[in-house]
Image: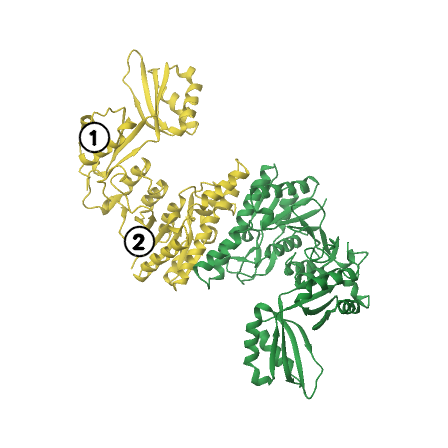
Chain colours: A green, B yellow
Amino acid sequence: MARIVMKFGGTSVADLDRIRNVATRVQREVAAGHEVAVVVSAMAGTTNQLVAWCQGLSPMFDAREYDTVVATGEQVTAGLLAIALQNLGLEARSWMGWQIAVDTDGQHGKARINDIEGEELITRMQAGQIPVVAGFQGIGPDNRITTLGRGGSDTSAVALAAALKADRCDIYTDVDGVYTTDPRIVAKARKLDKITYEEMLELASVGAKVLQTRSVELAMKEKVRVQVLSSFVEAPGTLVVDEDEIVEQEIVAGIAYSRDEAKVTVRRVPDKPGIAAAIFVPLAEAGINVDMIVQNVSADGTTDMTFTVGKTDLVQALASLDGVKNAIGYAEISTDKDVAKISVVGVGMRSHAGVAGTMFKTLAEKGINILVISTSEIKVSVLIAAEYTELAVRALHTAYGLDA
Amino acid sequence: MARIVMKFGGTSVADLDRIRNVATRVQREVAAGHEVAVVVSAMAGTTNQLVAWCQGLSPMFDAREYDTVVATGEQVTAGLLAIALQNLGLEARSWMGWQIAVDTDGQHGKARINDIEGEELITRMQAGQIPVVAGFQGIGPDNRITTLGRGGSDTSAVALAAALKADRCDIYTDVDGVYTTDPRIVAKARKLDKITYEEMLELASVGAKVLQTRSVELAMKEKVRVQVLSSFVEAPGTLVVDEDEIVEQEIVAGIAYSRDEAKVTVRRVPDKPGIAAAIFVPLAEAGINVDMIVQNVSADGTTDMTFTVGKTDLVQALASLDGVKNAIGYAEISTDKDVAKISVVGVGMRSHAGVAGTMFKTLAEKGINILVISTSEIKVSVLIAAEYTELAVRALHTAYGLDA
């Protein structure tokens, strides 16, 4: 017997038939002797409609009212699923964020969970009741409804699993697990049985959008075992767990790619102390996230500084650099939006040398030029011309022995 | 300067354009120097959709979950209208039933309001903020959302007006006031400037469905002045007020009709004490509302008992009578569904004789046979064959000098 939090996304509860299907899956876990709590998203399409209404009335809408409006999506699904579960003879009731309570900070539209009171729900689960919790929502210090931002229901589920001391948090979605890479571009991609939190975070941050990044960070911090699986297929998914749980660790877990970044090069910057701060502090103050950074070897007292920003931030980044041009004294700025970031991720890198070397060699063999390199403890990323994306991902997938 | 509660029904907030229109009407009252609170219904069609979803999952759905689901309709409108008001530069915020709080009893699906805490809203209104309150909803002793039953937003508005000590409660709807009779069948029907609570109650109970009956009862009890007016037409509506406020009281305020009742005659009932109780107590216990009752003069030790019930209750009423047939010992039962109840309503009847006589004489002149008569202090009702409905209403409208 285990205690499980089951979370169902918008496509899994998109209509009454799918809600009935979800109820049947919950029933099966209960029949297997488990204590179950459920977290639900809004029916697919609902949140977009509600957001469109807010925007239609005022482009600069009040985030507090936005929260009040969009939180209704999950409220409806929670009530409906409770009814569907009761119809199967199960004891169930819906819980809104303010009823539990899911205490959040006051950042309406992108609130963070401070605390979830789990005691009453645990008592009820032990007595056989199934709590059906509206995801994505909480209550702020102002006694008003807050929402956690898009995709926040994953975070709700993980936070609830921590508060309920659950053995596992099952995230049901429209994919059946985490793959070694995007199956749409690599036919030989394999579903992973297990992956570590760290690897999942690196994959999520470079475009494998299976789980919301914040939910993985929270799972790692709270040591919540997360399973990603399909609500439409009957099969185990991928377990996201602590490194200790994975006995036979692969060196490389997966290959990710992202075409969301643009490259910026600031040319002939005076090579003196403080120049990096002069460039990057104004960007940070403008709320622009800078990812890869490379500084060239200095020549004749100047250097080139290359970095990447999100494509949607590019115009603002250039404006910010223009504002400090006199202070910095650079010669010119060049940009390139036709780039892709390819990342090789694996905790095994910590103990195995040569992962980066294999990457560079593989890309060289395919004639792919590397524009920027950056590394972390468990990841090597390179920036290449976007047209080589699929070729690079496939070649690396084979090179690291990931092909099915 | 007055304090006004403005209530807008579902057709008045059916889409973003109409919500903007509502915001403009609120702005006008604020510009005139009034303190305003707003109560809103769900966007037209929303509640029906939500109810259909609950029914689709379980015909015997849990009323607590039903309340959680359907209350979202008003939550959405309240948030959206707050955004629309802010967009006009007004200070506004939405309030859910649980935030105010609107304390109700625990009868989910048909809760009654026990108390509304008005102090915080009054303070905010005095500081220039417009509360936008989700109608139809409150909170129960179980800390769960309750709803007041269909049409409950009128009751929410009147109860809020009482709690806020408002000078007036304006109910915006898709008709522009209360008429002397149904304008669809009498072209000469006149809009009334004022009508008493008692008259409004009698008119509402016989089919003039402008205001929910409970809201009028509450307005009478709490002495809340109510105005019924159109959200689409710029004109004063009809004030529903205490009798004292109406200086020149007409003897008859209006003519109402209802085709929702059926006539039942129990023939040759033994004429002895307790026989009425033997018939009507079982009907009451079956939850069947009996309206008009007539007992014929006794002949040869038996009598005929005639009464009316709602057409939708007829089958159940006959089953109830069949169950007590041996105990009562009647000869037979006859029924007639092709009947209409025509009512003449007016507080002036209390001090003016001859109102009933005029009614009977007018109908006789048109050759209309009266099947049943019943009277109250301010109303005379007759049951006639349904085919004469329009003829009777028009003739009476003229006879009492109500024609425009």
Q: Secondary structure at mark 2?
A: loop
Q: Residue furthest top?
A: B300
Q: Give the chain of mark 1.
A: B
Name the kind of residue labelled 1 in the image. Answer: Met
Residue at the disc numbered 2: B167
Residue named by callout 1: B359
x%, y% of residue A285? 57, 74
Residue at (76%, 69%) from the top-left corner?
A364
A77 in relation to A304, above or below: above
Viewer-side label of 2, 1 = 1
The amino acid at mark 2 is Asp
Q: Are marks 2 and 1 in contact (CB under 8 Å)?
A: no
Q: Residue at x 64, y 80 (%)?
A: A276
Near-viewer residue (B61 or B15): B15
| Residue A384 horizontal/vertical position (percent) | 69, 69
Image height of A106 relative to B38, above or below: below
Expressed as whole percent of the image width and height from the top left, the position of residue A188 reads: 74, 55
